[in-house]
Image (spheres, grey):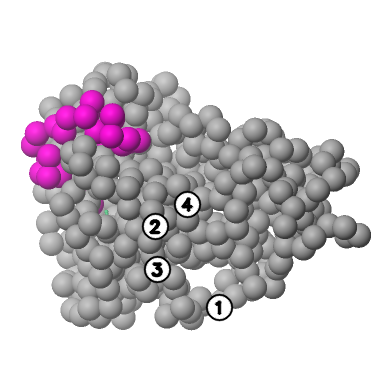
Amino acid sequence: MANALLIRGGRIIDPGQEIDKTGSLLIKEGKIAWLGDGTPPDADYDVLDADGLIVCPGFIDLHCHLRQPGDEEKETIATGTRAAAKGGFTTVCCMPNTNPPLDNESMISYVKTVAANESPIRVLPIGCVTLGRKGEELVDMSELEMAGAIAYSDDGAPVSSPEVMRRALEYSRDFHRPIIDHCENLFLTQGGQINEGVVSLELGLRGIPATAEELFIQRDLDLARETGGHIHIAHVSTEGSVELIRAAKEEGVPVTAEVSPHHLTLTEEAVLKFNTYAKVNPPLRTERDTLALLRALNDGVIDIVATDHAPHTASDKDCEFTQAAFGISGFETALGNLAGLILNSELSLNTLVAALTIGPARILGYEKLGTLEVGAPADVTIFDLHREWVVDAAQFVSRGKNTPLDGQTLKGKVMVTLYLGQPVYMDESLKIEARDGI
Ligand code: DOR
């Protein structure tokens, strides 16, 4: 084996550097060493032929659930991160709604230690906003900060008290960290199962109204405006939410926002026939909402795509609809779920790559991630936008086989994921070879 790797002849897309061209990438000692369209300066390298493939920075997921500690029957750090690598992710930020939750220094250290030993990729833990995610008492942010928390969230639950949220934003502003809020007015969602609308009426299920999300977002935007703290709105799902965020951004409020692949491609109709695999919180909405989300991603009102990978066991899902857990296992279908939008010209390829790379890196304030700049860590994802494949949830690396896409034929497949220059996932049709003639 040579001590360097040349990824040869792919379409290199690096929105952070405004690069979109055919070329080659040289990786050496875990870093990007050269990017160009001729022959690299070094003589000693192996070659990975990327002809016809897209080469971009490794995907960064700002929102996922790895379930460890406490819910290892759903997922572990080892299985979740392998699934993420298969989905093209080289960095994942894990939510703190574990058991116990990540609300103190030792829990953050635990996740970091397990990840250091068992994860093939980078794991960045998100700390709770409040102790036990109870919404009452703020965590000790400076303690969590020292331990390595990269953002704060009570995800799975909102921070209902405006007083607590206001203080959280004040503290996090000083640490330059985002508060990621799961925006849900619980008074409006009690017992809610799916979007409030025609499908909830037809199935006789209690609905979750759009206003439950929108009222909450409005409050968060007001608090961010007042405090100057960075609010990041998790899993935006409605047209009204988009309009609130758009107006706040125009005003200069420090807000960023994410959308999940399933909210871009699926509607409430996916739960017809009481399909628990499409039960997710916030719920799948209407076509009008998906179109608004798509427009918002294309025009930058929504900054990033985040999977909200939420693995659950078969028994969490194969039960009465009202008893079923909320959540979709999303790492392994993220690209395939979205590539169709690109192929139909509904989403720009550069926008999607930015939303999965430089976008989340900027929200985190990590200049060296999400880019193929010379000297940056060699986190690289190579994918085939046109490659067709059939989703077979039974074959997921994730323990969570819960996807409403099972059995569907998708286009867009991750072929190789490199983390610090090392392959952590490679499709069997590709191989790394010694340089011709050496
Ligand atoms: O559907 C969801 N599942 N939404 C959330 O907010 C939490 C997540 C989970 O942890 O399962």
Circle 4: residue type: Ile
Q: Quadrant of the N terminus?
A: bottom right
**Where does the image place residue 85, in percent across and percent down from the top left?**
50, 59
Quarter of the image holding residue 146?
top left
Q: Is label 2 in a helix, a strand or a loop?
A: helix
Q: Say if residue 218 shows up in the picture.
A: no
Residue at which label 3 appears:
398
Point 39% across, 65% down: residue: 79
Region of the chain picked out in magenta, as a range: 131-157
Front residue of 33/191: it is 33
Queried on whether the Cβ of the residue with tag 3 lies below 8 angstroms from ligand 1, the answer reads no
Residue at which label 1 appears:
390
Circle 3: residue type: Ser
Q: CA distance from mark 3 to mark 4?
A: 15 Å
Q: CA distance from mark 4 to mark 2?
A: 9 Å
153 up-or-down from 47: above or below: above
Residue at which label 2 appears:
118
Front residue of 226/272: it is 226
Point 32% across, 35% down: residue: 148
